[in-house]
Image: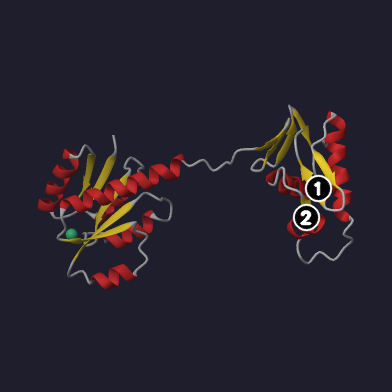
Amino acid sequence: MTKILLVEDESKIARFLELELAYEGYEVIVAADGRTGLEKALSGEADLVVLDLMLPQLSGIEVCRRLRQTSDLPVIMLTAKDDVCDKVNGLDTGADDYMTKPFAIEELLARIRNILQRRLKQRNTPLTSEPLRLGGLAMDIDAHTVHFNRNEISLTKREFDLLEYLMRHQNIVVTRDKLLDQVWGYDYAGDTNVVDVYIRYLRSKIDDPFNVSLIHTVRGVGYVMRYE
Ligand code: CA
């Protein structure tokens, strides 16, 4: 069950919001001052905080500032029209959203749903990407490893970068110049034969030991990685 921490000192408003949030299916934790609110926010049990700006002991801004030192818990800040809104909005309080009182409860509920959905999406987005594959060759960019079937292939940084570029452009013939630009950089001033040299290194580590032919020379043009 999603838990919402409500930090609001005006008991009437707190009670109203608590009932509305509970009706929507949220579990509500209420704190009536800034210090208690901060403690509960830091305890980690809430999924989101609805935080009033004007609070006894610690202001909403101060609660938010201290919370942000260690936590990215979503915060919706409640401000009153006479809280000098421009000043508040101009402050980098670290709140995810603001609502100006009086507001329609539906608007607050919509914003809560929005933030929680955004968080869920962020959490479910894998940080790792799929390995690049060709034949038995698998290149894991995140782990910086290359395998042929289950055998790990050890590559230098440059060999890895060259292989990555070729793997990302499978079945496309890439010129030496293009490889020089993309892998060695535009300001590379050395011998252009360096590409051929590194292609030989890759072949000696991939094609030769595993008796395959993945790296092909296209005479007079460049190279292509292809499984055939
Ligand atoms: Ca207040």
Q: Is residue 16 left or right of residue 124?
A: left
51 vs 212: above or below: below
Identify the coloring: secondary structure
Q: Is residue 63 visible?
A: yes
Between discs 2 and 1, the one toward the N terminus: 2
Q: Is residue 36 visible?
A: no
Residue drawn at 89 percent across, 61 percent down: 191
Q: Are marks 2 and 1 in contact (CB under 8 Å)?
A: yes
Query: Residue 177 at x, y = what percent?
Result: 80, 59
Q: In the rendered image, which residue does mark 1 sit on? A: 223
Q: Is residue 192 left or right of residue 149?
A: right
Q: Is mark 1 within 8 Å of ligand 1?
A: no
Mark 2, other Cα within 10 Å: few <14 / some 14–19 / many ≥20: many
Query: Residue 176 at x, y = what percent?
Result: 82, 55
Q: Is residue 82 left or right of residue 199?
A: left
Q: In the rendered image, which residue does mark 2 sit on? A: 179
Q: CA distance from mark 2 to mark 1?
A: 9 Å
Q: Nearer the viewer, residue 200 or 153?
A: 200
Q: Nearer the viewer, residue 222 or 105?
A: 222
- Which quadrant does the N terminus fall into? top left
Query: Residue 29 at x, y = what percent?
Result: 23, 42
Residue drawn at 87 percent across, 55 percent down: 194
Task: Describe the element under mark 1 as helix, strand or loop.
Answer: strand
Q: Nearer the viewer, residue 165 or 83?
A: 165
Residue drawn at 17 percent across, 55 percent down: 9
